[in-house]
C-alpha cells in the first residue's frame, strides 16, 4: 500500500536501534525523508549509512534527549536540512525492572526525563513548524504499561501513562492546527532494551539465554506466543503518520500480541 509519505519529512527520536531504527527504515521505504537522533555516535552512524545505502535521504544528529538544548538542535538541524517537518515520532525512552516506590527521586527523574520530558520538549519544538505547513502528525511510542502497569516498573509505567494522557490532550489542543496526535502501545517486542532486561533480570530465573527468556515470557503473557518484531510496530506508526489515517487522532493503539486483550 502506498501511504503517500513520499517526500514527507519525519523526525524520529532515538532512531539508531530497535523500534526507532525500524521506524526510520519504514518511513524510508515509503519515500519519506528521515532525520534520526541518538546519544551514541557509533550506532547512529551505522544506521545512517544503512539508510543512505537503501536510498533514503537521511540526516543523523548526535543528541541526548534528556537535554533541552540537544532536542532544540536536532529539530533546528532537521529543518535546516529539509526545510520543513511533517511528522514527529517520539520514541526515546528507557526502563529498569525492579523499581520500588522508595527509590530516590533522582532515579525516577532519569526515567521521566528520557521517557516523558523528551516527548514534551520535542513536541514543543516541532509544533511551530507543523503549523507553518498547515498540519502534520505526531506519534508517541508509549507502552501497554501506561494503562496496565507492570510490576517493578512504577516510574516507567507512570511516565508512559502520562504520555497517553498527553497524547489525548494534545490531540484536542492541536486539532485546530490540523495536527493529529496518536500513540502506539507495544508490549514484549524484541528490541535491545528488552534484550538488556532479559540478561540483567530474567536470566537464569526464566532461562539460560535471551531466547529462552523471551519464549517463556511470551507464553506466560501473550495470546500470540512470541515476542513481537519491531517492523510489526513500525508499519502501524507509518500508517498513523499518513493521510490514510486522516480520521484518526487521540487514539492509542495496542500492538501487543493480545497482552491487554480488550483494554483500549
Image (spheres, helix red, strand yellow):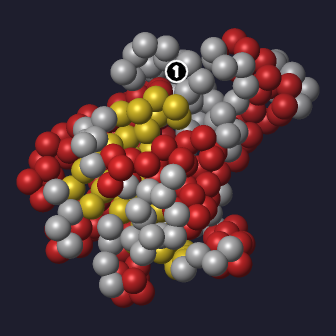
In the image, residue 197 lies at what x, y percent? 70, 36
Foreground of the two, 51 or 199:
51
Q: Residue at x 36, y 33 (%)?
A: 252
Secondary structure beneath disc 1?
loop
In-image side of 18 versus 116 (left or right): right
Q: What residue occupies the far right of the structure in this picture? A: 208
| 113 in relation to 47, above or below | above
- Number of marks in the image? 1
User: Which residue is under mark 1?
Assistant: 150
Circle 1 Cα neighbour tier, 10 Å, few/some/many (<14 / 14–19 / ≥20): few
Q: Quadrant of residue 126?
A: bottom left
In this rendering, does residue 24 appear at all? no
Res. 185 visible in picture = yes
Question: Which residue sits at x=36%, y=62%?
Answer: 87
Q: Is residue 17 left or right of residue 185?
A: right
Classify residue 127 as left or right of residue 71: left
The x, y position of residue 139, in whole percent, is: 37, 50
Rendered view: 110 above or below 75: above
Q: Is residue 110 left or right of residue 234?
A: left
* Image position, residue 262 (x, y; %): 43, 13
User: Which picture quadrant has residue 85?
Assistant: bottom left
Q: Is residue 146 above or below residue 4?
A: above
Residue 56 position, x and y percent, is 59, 76
Amino acid at each position: 500500500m502506498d501511504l503517500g509519505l513520499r517526500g514527507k519529512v519525519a523526525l524520529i527520536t532515538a532512531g539508531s536501534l530497535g523500534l526507532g531504527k525500524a521506524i526510520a527504515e519504514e518511513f524510508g521505504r515509503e519515500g519519506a525523508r528521515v532525520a534520526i537522533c541518538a546519544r551514541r555516535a557509533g550506532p547512529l552512524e551505522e544506521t545512517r549509512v544503512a539508510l543512505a545505502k537503501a536510498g533514503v535521504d537521511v540526516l543523523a544528529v548526535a543528541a541526548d534527549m534528556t537535554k533541552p538544548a540537544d532536542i532544540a538542535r536536532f529539530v533546528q538541524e532537521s529543518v535546516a536540512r529539509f526545510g520543513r517537518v511533517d511528522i514527529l515520532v517520539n520514541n526515546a525512552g528507557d526502563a529498569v525492572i525492579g523499581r520500588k516506590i522508595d527509590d530516590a527521586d533522582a532515579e525516577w527523574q532519569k526515567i521521566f526525563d528520557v521517557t516523558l520530558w523528551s516527548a514534551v520538549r520535542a513536541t514543543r519544538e516541532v509544533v511551530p513548524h507543523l503549523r507553518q505547513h498547515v498540519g502534520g502528525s505526531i506519534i508517541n511510542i508509549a507502552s501497554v504499561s501506561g494503562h496496565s502497569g507492570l510490576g517493578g516498573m512504577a516510574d516507567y509505567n507512570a511516565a508512559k501513562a502520562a504520555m497517553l494522557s498527553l497524547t489525548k490532550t494534545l490531540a484536542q489542543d492541536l486539532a485546530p492546527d490540523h495536527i493529529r496526535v496518536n500513540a502506539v502501545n507495544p508490549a514484549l517486542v524484541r528490541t535491545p532494551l528488552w534484550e538488556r532486561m532479559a540478561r540483567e533480570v530474567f536470566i537464569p530465573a526464566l532461562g539460560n539465554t535471551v531466547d529462552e527468556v523471551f519464549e517463556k515470557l511470551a507464553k506466560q503473557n501473550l495470546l500470540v506466543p512470541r515476542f513481537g518484531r519491531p517492523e510489526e510496530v513500525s508499519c502501524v506508526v507509518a500508517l498513523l503518520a499518513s493521510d490514510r489515517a486522516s480520521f484518526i487522532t487521540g487514539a492509542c493503539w495496542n500492538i501487543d500480541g493480545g497482552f491487554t486483550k480488550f483494554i483500549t
